[in-house]
Amino acid sequence: MTTLNGRAQQFIDEVLRLAPRMAAFDCDGTLWAGDSGEGFFYWEIERGLVSREIEAWARPRYADYRAGKVDEDTMCGEMVTMNRGLKEADLIRAAEEYFAERCAKSIFSDMHELLQRLQAAGCEIWVVSSTNEWVIRASTRYLSISPDHVIAASAKVADGVVTGELLRMPSGAGKPLGLRELARRIPDAAFGNSRWDVDMLQSAGRAFAVNPNPDLAELAGRTGWRVYFPESLHRTE
């Protein structure tokens, strides 16, 4: 087990006292620092995984998204389906390499400890993210979570090849929807960091705003949701 400071241990003990039987976690910004979806988007383009034609479309499209001209769900879905025609096995290997290289060291140690302690107490863990499922599945080996308990942006795969048909987009209302469809239950506790997690947080028995963006922090203040900043951020509540 990791050696934690008093504030982190207090938070973990607070969650454990609830004795949740199932907990759901957002990933980017909640379990690790940074946006792995955006990171993988540029990483695979720079390594030539997608064609030059796709790259020529993708870069300005993402710029439009950052400028507010493309909505969240549409962009996150397109970041998956732009891989149409690629072998899924190649994307799985690429995602594993990317996560090991860029994300593994950014996992919040206290959140990792919380996951381990919850599982040791018999709590079922699900991770829910609008990032593509290849990256989120790659994270499970570092978090000791079952790959079968991943709900992430995904496209239909036919004969081992990714198609342009989007299967799931767990963002906003899509997060509790995915939990109902796959986990088949409402989480006793949910953890998220942005407004795209609000629906999931509202659906849970207890909500925790972890490393919240300003808009979620403001909502948490009004609703009484517990706010926690991971110790590796060197911030105070």
Image: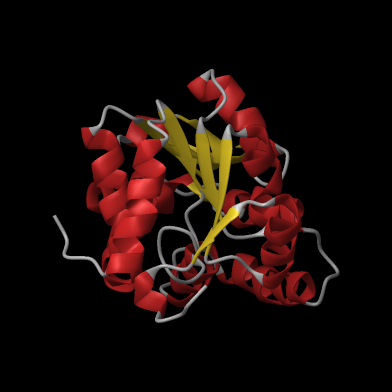
Above or below 175: residue 74: below
Which sits in the foreground, 193 or 218? 218
- Position of the N terminus by quadrant: bottom left
Percent position of residue 80, x then y: 58, 51
Question: Which quadrant holds residue 166?
Answer: top right
Residue 24 visible here: yes
- Residue 187 point in image, percent of width and height: 52, 30
Image side of residue 48 versus residue 85, left or right: left
| Residue 183 horizontal/vertical position (percent) | 49, 23
Q: Quadrant of residue 70?
A: bottom right
Q: Nearer the viewer, residue 224 or 166?
A: 224
Q: Say which residue appears at 37% left-offset and 38% top-offset.
A: 17
Q: Residue at x 76, y 69 (%)?
A: 65
Residue for point 57% across, 72% down = 52
- Location of residue 184 with respect to 162 vertically, above or below: above
The outermost residue toward the right is: 69
Q: Which residue of the protein is positioned furthest toward the bottom in this rendering?
A: 234
In-front residue for pair 99/197? 197
Residue 222 higher or lower than 59, as above or below:
above
Pick whichever, 113 or 135, lies toward us: 113
At horizontal 41% and vertical 58% (from top left) the residue drawn is 31
- Image-quadrant location for residue 107: bottom left
Task: Please give left or right for residue 158 compared with residue 82 in the image.
Answer: left
Q: Is residue 199 left or right of residue 209?
A: right
Residue 93 in view = no
- In the rendered structure, the answer to whether residue 52 lies left or right of residue 96 reads right
Q: Is residue 74 above or below residue 125?
A: below
